[in-house]
Amino acid sequence: MVGAIYVRKTSRVGPISLSTKFFQGLGALPDVFKGFGFNTFLLFFYSQVLGAPPVLVATAIALTTVLDGAVDPLIGSFSDNLKSRLGRRHPLMYASVLPLVLGLYLVFSPPTGLDHNGLFAWIFATTALVGIAISLFSVPWTALMAELSDDYAERTEIVVWRYAVGWIGGLAFTFSVWTFIFPATPAFPRGQLNADNYVLFAPVLAVCVGLAALVATQLTRREIPFLVQPAAASSFSLRRMIDELFSMLSNRDFLVLFMGALLSACIGGTTSALEIYMSTYFWGLGSAELRWFSLAFFGAAAAFVLLPRMQRILDKKILMLGCFGLLLLDGVTMISLRLLEVLPANGEPALLILLLANTIFRTFLGTVLGVMFISMLADSLDAQELRNGKRQEGMFAAALSFSTKATAGVGVLAGGLLLQNVIQWPVGKTTGVIDPDIVFRLGLVAGVLVPLAYVAPLLVGMGYRITREAHAEIRRQVAAQRLSSFGHDPDPPAAPPTTANTPLAEPTAP
């Protein structure tokens, strides 16, 4: 069945330029910066620094992530059907900048004197604003990334650039935050425990995220003529959005990826909520040591270099599942060695070296896994167009965003529940020695029990079916489907590679 008709104003000749790959990669930075701030400091700041109960904080975070995750399909459907002089994606990306800056500043700047109920309301309101604002940017940006190319291998290159730029920017941001915003002092050897440091962190985080979103949007405007738009404008329809959701979930390969993302985000959210507790108390690391974990970029860099060769040898699914399995084994093994007292003692240089080496290795595996996952998602979009004739990049991006946000919120809630009820962590204790039995329980829960849950998404991922050969056949059938609808293909395959994009018509100036 052929649905809506989509056209490009200008057909691209040759491969995507290097600068375009870099500019779209800049779009990774807002979520990388925001993710570092939220995953590392949000629960820790409100519970450990301000003294709010972990469950109260985690509940507020979970509710807001579910709320803004539910908004994502609305954004995706609206973006997919939008027809404007700025295309389907850029208007929403521009609209996200100001609420992002405001929301991020307010999250880490709560008014003084709030009781626990007041803190709950503040967390809920400000994180909801940030969540909706980041969706306004990330949903259309992810869709834009999937639209840039239909080629099986070139899509992976685009995702690699996304990860490369995200990692380099994240490395610089992480190192700078630990070095200049949370430095060790005689009063606070672990700078993340000093409440005064968050006064500077709030505006720095807000400005960096907002600026990155604005720059990425502006620099990719030149790609608008090459992106598909509906041939005819249509108004937003809630019924259509619901139909599109059910249509997506009937796509078996997308459903496999969606369920894998649901499970992974829930487990990852729990891990992220507990990670700074592990770094601070289980491994005994201060800000002076934590900043060196930015060297994890070398693992990502190795993945960027080796991925093209790896993908020529193996299918995306094999690479993703292999990395998944190795990550699971590595996580459980490292913590088990510490609990068995095989690793060097805390404070010894050898331990820091081992932790850094392990982080680089895990980053290599995680980068390969992430690139393959997103590239596989883009391939499932082509299968969707073959089934119903619709280009639904925005809805697919929204569904994925919903899965990660909603279940990451559940993960944060699970982390808070584990801290308070299983690990029995002391609230608001910023100095002194934590009971060794409590630290042991922290390591057992965060380092062994939680990572073992990754077996579930690993098993789900085995159901993905689109191979290199299957994707080539899907693209051939999509081209034939377009030909039967138009009498010609409105989106012909790329010509032999050149170094430039040759427009067939001059784009209209916005």
Image (cartoon, rainbow, N blue to C red):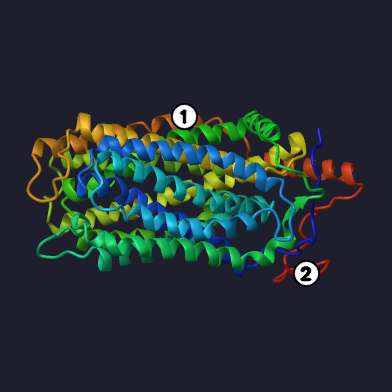
User: Residue at coordinates 7% horizontally, 49% vertically from top-left?
Assistant: 432
In terms of image quadrants, where is residue 12?
bottom right
Position in image of residue 396 (x %, y %): 61, 41
Position in image of residue 389 (x %, y %): 77, 39
**Residue 333 higher or lower than 28, as above or below:** above
Q: Residues within 10 Å of mark 2 (few under 14, many from 20)?
A: few
Out of 166 and 121, give the one closest to the viewer. Answer: 121
- Horizontal arrangement in the rendering, residue 9 relative to residue 361 (left or right): right
User: Residue at coordinates 21% horizontally, 65% vertically from top-left?
Assistant: 183
User: Residue at coordinates 76% horizontally, 64% vertically from top-left?
Assistant: 13
Position in image of residue 308 (x %, y %): 55, 56
**Helix or strand or loop: what does disc 2 sit on?**
loop
**Residue 392 higher or lower than 27, as above or below:** above
- Horizontal arrangement in the rendering, residue 461 relative to residue 3 (left or right): left
In the image, what residue type sits under mark 2?
Answer: Thr
Out of 169 and 252, give the one closest to the viewer. Answer: 169
Name the mark on residue 459.
Answer: 1
Give the Cα distance between marks 1 and 2.
45 Å
Looking at the image, is mark 1 or mark 2 nearer the viewer?
2
**Residue 167 higher or lower than 479, as above or below:** below
In terms of image quadrants, where is residue 149?
bottom right
Quarter of the figure that contains the C terminus = bottom right
In terms of image quadrants, where is residue 412?
top left
In the image, what residue type sits under mark 1?
Answer: Leu
User: Residue at coordinates 13% horizontally, 60% vertically from top-left?
Assistant: 189
Position in image of residue 269 (x %, y %): 37, 40
Residue for badge 2: 502
Out of 243 and 300, give the one closest to the viewer. Answer: 243
- Horizontal arrangement in the rendering, residue 246 relative to residue 432 (left or right): right
Q: Is residue 169 visible?
A: no
**Helix or strand or loop: what does disc 1 sit on?**
helix
